[in-house]
Amino acid sequence: MNKPQRSISPKIAFHLHRWHRRFGVISALFILLLSITGILLQHPEGFGLTKSKVEQQWLLKSYGIDLPKVDEGFKFKQRYITQIDDVIFLDDSKLANFSDKIIAAAPTGEWWFVAGTESILLFTSTDELIDKISYPLLIETPVTQISSSGSMVVVKAQNGFFQISKDWDKANTINFIREPSWILAESLPQELAQQIQYSFRSQQLNWERVVLDLHSGRLLGQWGPWLMDLMAALFIILAISGIWLWSRKKRW
């Protein structure tokens, strides 16, 4: 003979329901957060997360991205060329990536150039990158100084002084009684230096990374992932308690 199944106490059922609802409200906020961030991460290109850079300084600071040091640049035509790490800026806008240390920037004929110790970047008058070229074979790098006057470009290399041809593919040895005026870096205006710092800083973080860290909890610091684990455990408890309450509903 089967024993009658003991029904749940109405008082216990009441408290279980109350706590189930409370936990449900809390978990709903996290479910909403995870759902939204999950959708965004499924389509990062469509939402522009990969290309959109973070400009909020407090958020960049929370990631430990400090303002870089920049106080000098090469001036020509009332504009400044500066370099931070491997990024070159034209005024406060990113111009190109360049791993060489820049030593000069100047116009030459129809073009203008940014010279590094090992290679040269050529740009059109509208600031479009034409090509990255190496110094002619006769020149032993690293190049240390450059002088430019019109279409005439003279470089100081490890093995002497050279004049580079207009096509940048040949070099001729040249001797001086007195060295030319080398292109030198100048101090940046304080306002421009700050703008370049902020511009570079914003290039280091995009919104895809922020949303990913928000989804995983890492945005909240070292305890963030543990909080997400705790919420995952709460979801499990809610699922189990919900099923159990539903299965016992007819008996109390």
Image (spheres, rainbow, N blue to C red):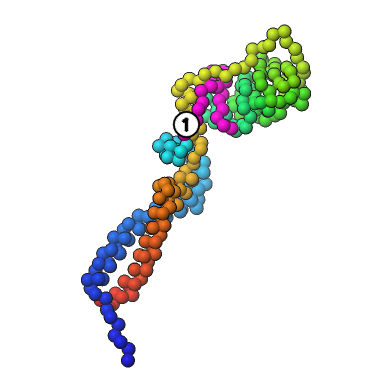
Q: How crowded is mark 1: few (under 14 residues within 10 Å), some or many (20 or more)?
A: some
Name the kind of residue labelled 1 in the image. Answer: Leu
Q: In the rendered image of this protein, does residue 125 appear above or below residue 228?
A: above
The residue sitting at 51% across, 23% down in the picture is: 71
Q: Is residue 73 magenta?
A: yes
Comparing 165 with 145, the one in front is 145
22 sits to left or right of 193:
left
Residue 147 seen from this side: yes
Residue beneath label 1, please?
67
- Magenta span covers which residues? 66-87
- Residue shown at 46% from the left, 21% from the top: 190
Residue furthest toward the top?
177
Instruction: Determine the secondary structure under disc 1.
Output: loop
> Where does the image place residue 236, in percent across and percent down from the top left?
39, 64
Give me the residue at 24% from left, 69% from top. Answer: 14
Question: On the rendered structure, is 123 left or right of 58?
Answer: right
In the depicted structure, whether residue 120 falls above or below residue 152: below
Residue 63 % position (x, y): 45, 40
- Locate residue 158, reporting x and y percent: 72, 22
Between residue 56 and residue 226, name the one nearer to us.
Answer: 226
Is 93 part of what is drawn in magenta? no
Residue 20 against residue 177 in the figure, above or below = below
**Whole-percent x and y of residue 68?**
50, 30
